[in-house]
Amino acid sequence: MRKLTYFIACTIDGFIGDPKGDATSTYRYVAGEYLDYLKTEYPETIAAPGRPVVGLDPDAENQHFDTVIQGLNSYRIGLDVGVTSPYSHLRELVATRSLTESPDPNVELIADDLVGRVRELKAEDGPLGIWLCGGSTIAGELIDEIDELIIKTYPQVYGSGMPMFGADFEPRDFELGAVRTFDNGVLVRTYIRKR
Ligand SMILES: NC(=O)c1ccc[n+]([C@@H]2O[C@H](COP(=O)([O-])OP(=O)(O)OC[C@H]3O[C@@H](n4cnc5c(N)ncnc54)[C@H](OP(=O)(O)O)[C@@H]3O)[C@@H](O)[C@H]2O)c1
């Protein structure tokens, strides 16, 4: 079995973006010691077009994930500027019912039975896991499939915004794993799902 990991950036008050999902106010924290950590530990989470910008080798080896899943709204951010395969170094899956033809041979569209497709991916063998990129809607739909949370918290408070999960209320328990702190106030916590 492979793990489904929701690897996500949020504010102190748990928002992954402003009410429309925009999180550009947090980008300035992606620098220095923390950026070095991402480049070393999670290079596959840095999109292909961003790699030259942050000085990451375009062929950097994937460390934790070989697959990424996004909802259409998240995928559309790249698509709108002509990026059809933002994570071309990973197998890419995009959940959508409105987009009927994949814009890129590396991108598989999921229209029906999202949970079933994710369970199939989890049942595959392999040393690397599956990255649930977001956003809020798809994370809410997959909340009970998530095995691990890696939450990158930036030292900002929004007051309101897009929640980490668009899901109904239900307490779900996780066990705290690794905690990393960085000199610019960023905190990265890993939580493992208690089943
Ligand atoms: N802070 C972070 O680390 C982070 C990471 C990722 C994203 N984000 C932000 O999250 C925002 C997007 O989040 P969002 O909640 O608006 O949207 P989303 O989850 O990215 O995408 C929602 C769309 O996915 C499709 N979808 C959802 N469930 C589906 C299902 N069961 N089957 C088939 N398709 C399904 C639907 O597309 P159709 O309408 O085509 O059916 C739906 O409109 C973006 O603004 C992005 O910036 C932040």
Image (cartoon, rainbow, N blue to C red):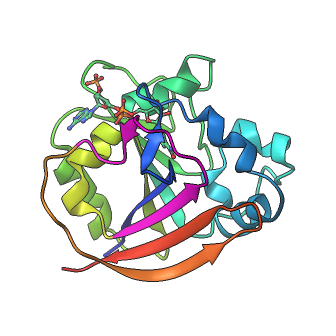
Ligand 1 image-quadrant field: top left
Residue at horizontal 13 percent and vertical 47 percent from the top: 168
Q: Nearer the viewer, residue 60 or 4?
A: 4
Where is 170 relative to 22, above or below? below
Q: Residue furthest right?
A: 55
**20 left or right of 77?**
left
Image quadrant assignment for residue 183:
bottom right
User: Residue 187 location in percent, x, y?
Assistant: 60, 66
Residue at horizontal 62 percent and vertical 18 percent from the top: 82
Image quadrant assignment for residue 99:
top left
Q: Which residues are magenta?
A: 148-166
Residue at horizontal 87 percent and vertical 50 percent from the top: 55
Q: Quadrant of the C terminus?
A: bottom left
Q: Nearer the viewer, residue 48 or 36?
A: 36
Q: Nearer the viewer, residue 49 or 135?
A: 135
Q: Nearer the viewer, residue 167 or 41?
A: 167
Image quadrant assignment for residue 109:
top left
Residue 154 lies in the magenta-colored region: yes
User: Residue 184 location in percent, x, y?
Assistant: 75, 60
**37 left or right of 102?**
right
Q: Quadrant of the N terminus?
A: bottom left
User: Residue 26 location in percent, x, y?
Assistant: 64, 42
Residue at horizontal 83 percent and vertical 54 percent from the top: 57
